Amino acid sequence: MPITYEELVAAEISGLYQGGLWLSAGDEGAAEDLVLATVVRGLGPFAALPAAHDPARWLEGRLAREFADRHGSGAQARVAAAPTSLSPAALERLRAIDAQALHRAAALLPPAARAALWLVVLRRWRYADAAAALGIDVEELKRLLSYRQALLVALLRGGAAGASGAALT
């Protein structure tokens, strides 16, 4: 028997909220608003979802697209390549990173990069699927994924706690 939209949302709400927190850089209110908008706007399209689609992945992709669209970081956005400066020894300091530090570091990334990293790095989506969910091509997705290095650098610097807050663009 097919899953209902209500059952899907109930099963995925915790993961959606975690994704919303990541995408919203730890802002709980913004995360809740993002999840709510995703759920409300997904009801109609869910009815037309082909049976072969994984409904959980579909809903996760809608969350990322909702975020990207809100920040103008869908197909029309172009973001500069991320800076790259991370020593292998610095990776050892990453073990003590908590959720707040991760969110502070995520706040420094452009929204499009944050959405791409969430789908591919944190949720382990395939490039083609993530690009389609975000409304961009695979080459643009790869460019956005270059921000994983910038994320690590920001994490090692404390997620910009006490920093100027300037984005890594």
Image: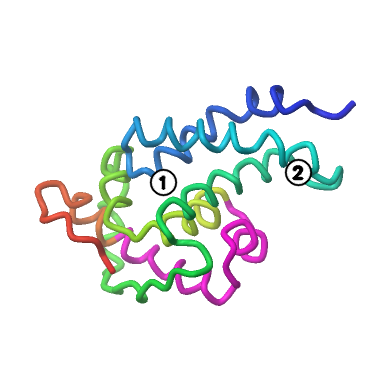
Per the image, label 2 sits on a secondary structure element best described as: loop
Q: Nearer the viewer, residue 39 or 102?
A: 39
Q: Is residue 124 above or below residue 75?
A: above
Residue 161 position within the rendered picture, expressed as x and y whole percent measured from the top left: 15, 47
Q: Residue tagged by mark 1?
A: 23
> Residue at left 52%, top 47%?
66
Q: Quadrant of residue 79?
A: bottom left
Q: Nearer the viewer, residue 34 or 144?
A: 34
Q: Is residue 135 magenta?
A: yes
**Left or right of 153: which side holds 23?**
right
Residue 27 position within the rendered picture, expressed as x and y whole percent measured from the top left: 31, 36
Q: Residue tagged by mark 2?
A: 54
> Residue at left 55%, top 57%?
120
> Residue at left 69%, top 28%?
8
Q: Nearer the viewer, residue 30 or 142?
A: 30
Q: For the residue carrying disc 1, how many other residues have a C-alpha within 10 Å: few (<14), some (14-19), or many (20+)?
A: many
Report the predominant secondary structure element of the magenta stretch: helix
N-terminal of the pair, mark 1 or mark 2, is: 1
The span picked out in magenta is: 124-152
Task: Please name the amino acid that badge 1 sits on.
Answer: Leu
Q: Is residue 167 above or below residue 98?
A: below
Q: Is residue 105 above or below residue 21?
A: below
Per the image, label 1 sits on a secondary structure element best described as: helix
Q: Quadrant of residue 15?
A: top right
Q: Is residue 146 magenta?
A: yes
Residue 130 position within the rendered picture, expressed as x and y whole percent measured from the top left: 60, 59
